[in-house]
Image: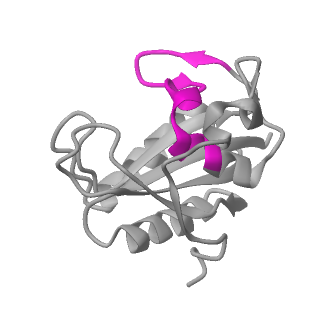
Amino acid sequence: MSVVTYIGMGSNLGDSVQILREAAHKLAELGPIQVSRLYRSPPMGPQDQPHYYNAVVQLVTTLQPLDLLDQLQRFEQEAGRVRLRRWGERTLDLDVLLYADQSIENERLNVPHIGLLERDFVVLPLLDIESNLKVRDQWLRDLKWSQASTLTVIDDKHWVEK
């Protein structure tokens, strides 16, 4: 059975746009995708690092949650994932944000993603794809992030095709 999932994507090391583009193409091998606009955002953690490039991909997949997580981690490794410190620089970061309407809590995966409602670099790209998303009884369009954000739009939804 296919389910709709949302994958958060981020990068601030290397050619971030190309790294995210390649990750989106790999996600498309797992099932049909839709992409958000491409954004640039200030780092959430230590401020002595480059700004991030962020996007969200909607993926329709038959993979179970932990199998999907395994694939995402494989894609990160293939991209030469570097994670130097907590909330620090990353070559590629892929997160399962939502998996259908399931709540998942285990040692490897928490869905909806922890912090999703507090991060404009997740909320705005999600709204690009689906304007009527509700997470933990909260409409995303009603969050403060949808009104005031620190994000810069870098490209429309065609950035993956370039």
Q: Which residue appears farthest toward the front when viewing the image?
A: 148
Q: Residue at x 25, y 57 (%)?
A: 50
In this rendered view, identify the residue nearer to me: 58 or 64: 58
**Residue 19 falls in which quadrant of the image?**
bottom left
Q: Residue at x 62, y 51 (%)?
A: 125
Which quarter of the image is occupied by the C terminus? bottom right
Residue stretch rendered in magenta on the structure: 103-124
Q: Is residue 92 above or below residue 107?
A: below
Instruction: Find out whether residue 148 is within the magenta segment.
Output: no
Q: Is residue 104 above or below residue 28?
A: above
Q: Position of residue 149 (x, y in %)?
A: 55, 45
Q: Which residue appears farthest toward the right when viewing the image?
A: 132
Q: Position of residue 105 (x, y in %)?
A: 53, 15
In this rendered view, identify the residue nearer to me: 22 or 71: 22
Q: Is residue 154 above or below residue 77?
A: below
| Residue 52 appearing in the image | yes
Q: Residue at x 71, y 61 (%)?
A: 34
Instruction: Find out whether residue 123 is within the magenta segment.
Output: yes
Left or right of 129, for residue 8: left
Left or right of 157, for residue 20: left
In this rendered view, identify the residue nearer to me: 16 or 44: 44
Which quarter of the image is occupied by the N terminus? top right
Q: Residue at x 39, y 45 (%)?
A: 73
